[in-house]
Image (cartoon, grey):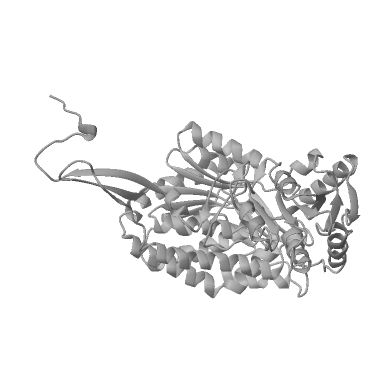
Amino acid sequence: MSFERKEYQFLAEIGVGPANPGCYINGEWKARGPLVSSVNPSNNQRIAVVTEASIEDYEEGLMACSEAAKTWMKIPAPKRGEIVRQIGEALRAKLGSLGRLVSLEMGKILAEGIGEVQEIVDMCDYAVGLSRQINGSIIPSERPDHMMCEVWNPMGIVGVITAFNFPCAVLGWNACLALVCGNCVVWKGAPTTPLVTIAVTKLVAEVLEKNNLPGAIFTSFCGGAEIGEAISKDARIPLVSFTGSSKVGLMVQQAVNQRFGKCLLELSGNNAIIIMEDADIGLAVRSVLFAAVGTAGQRCTTCRRLLVHESIYETVLNQLIDVYKQVKMGDPLEKGTLVGPLHTRASKENFEKGIEIIKFQGGNILIGGSTVESEGNFVQPTIVEISPNASVVKEELFGPVLYVMKFQTFEEAVEMNNSVPQGLSSSIFTRKPEVIFKWIGPHGSDCGIVNVNIPTNGAEIGGAFGGEKATGGGREAGSDSWKQYMRRSTCTINYGNELPLAQGINFG
């Protein structure tokens, strides 16, 4: 059996065929669930077919993973780091092909597809160093001949449920840390990007096999809500990382909380850029363009609201509209394309519905606002003037729609920034130190990512990634995010012959 289109032949280089079992269970590829098609969003044509996981597949996978966890957590952390280093090298060797697959199946432009795979490679490099730095504290004890310390141990299994917009990078944020921390990983990729799930898993599986390690250390499933629900409810999985909408994230959180598990949530964003009167307008406009139309507005960190000081409002708007007119839309694999399609037909329909609601609520469309007649899911990058009080502004329309509003004072801009339920990313453009430090301080942005003179998107892996409020409160990737993937114990050791009690208590 061969691929229907010649341009898909490269997929064979990364282990993807025209028909694929969608589960990696106990070191084997198998699946007994429904057959689904992976679709190219540029033309809505089938790329390949995948057999999804059944609940029976899930149970078989979790049983094997639970056994593998006993082996993996006993391996010294630096040795686990060496395995992650090899995974990074395997990904690096297939960077171009994997990036091309991400672009083909998700719809983001090739530069972004390759950049996404590079992000996992970077996470592997970061995790290798971390594997020699997972340390606790020595704590002074008030009791003689006693010492206190913190000990960090693996949790066992970490469940990772990822979304279509970053079909492999978010796995990297979680899995690289989870693995060096001594946990096995159970990954459910997005239902609409199964080929990325399969290709990445095959590279990880090859590394495990080469090192004579159980394949079940990394278990993956292609599947839908049924598998995600099973992960959420499974008491064998102490930590579940979920990336997706706030609505679904709340359901995941409730299910995990019911069994007293832990949740790491990366949910919706409704991100704002503020342009102050002293800003470098050229720099700001270029930043807004990337933040608002990159990935066709389908990043969680996409800029959805632009707040401009009234004194420069017309100047900024005119320049922004000019650069929007120059944006090339088309096949994301073609050189020069800046905006590809939305990911699914349903996304395109949601865009159309959103535009109608925007108009109904008094929005004035300055550019764009329509779908593009084609076989694919293309829509026009759109700029809308609208009141900050319109209810549609409080919601996340997952597409290239930018709401623009004016303000008079810094305090007013901050209030507008913080007025939405979500709290992921934010940025301000200014050269004034006093404004910068107010912005990043307690009376500034209430988001998890607070930038200055850069876009809201394009975060580096060295910092903790995540947001507040309806964004979920989770933190992934850098800084001390690794602590969420481990179990902390406070240990008190008596190395003397007496039994003094804390707080000076005398008991008998």
Q: Which residue shows up at 40% across the image and 68% down it?
A: 210
Instruction: Find residue 198 and report its horizontal and vertical position in percent.
Output: 57, 60
For this orientation, the residue located farthest to the front is 434
Q: Relative to 412, is 458 on the left or the right?
A: left
- The image quadrant where one finds the C terminus is top left
Answer with the quarter of the image where residue 273 lies.
bottom right
Is residue 480 at least partly visible in the picture? yes
Instruction: Find residue 131 and report its horizontal and vertical position in percent.
Output: 38, 62
Instruction: Find residue 431 and report its horizontal and vertical position in percent.
Output: 69, 63
Between residues 300 and 394, which one lies in front from this camera angle? Answer: 394
Is residue 25 at least partly visible in the picture? no
The image shows residue 206, relative to residue 415, as above or below, that is below
Q: Relative to 246, is 88 on the left or the right?
A: left
Number of numbered discs overlaid on the protein picture: 0
Q: Which residue shows up at 56% across the image and 73% down it?
A: 94
For this orientation, the residue located farthest to the left is 497
- The image quadrant where one finds the N terminus is bottom right
Answer with the quarter of the image where residue 193 lies.
bottom right
Instruction: Find residue 31 and report its horizontal and vertical position in percent.
Output: 54, 51
Between residues 196 and 357, which one lies in front from this camera angle? Answer: 357
For this orientation, the residue located farthest to the top is 508
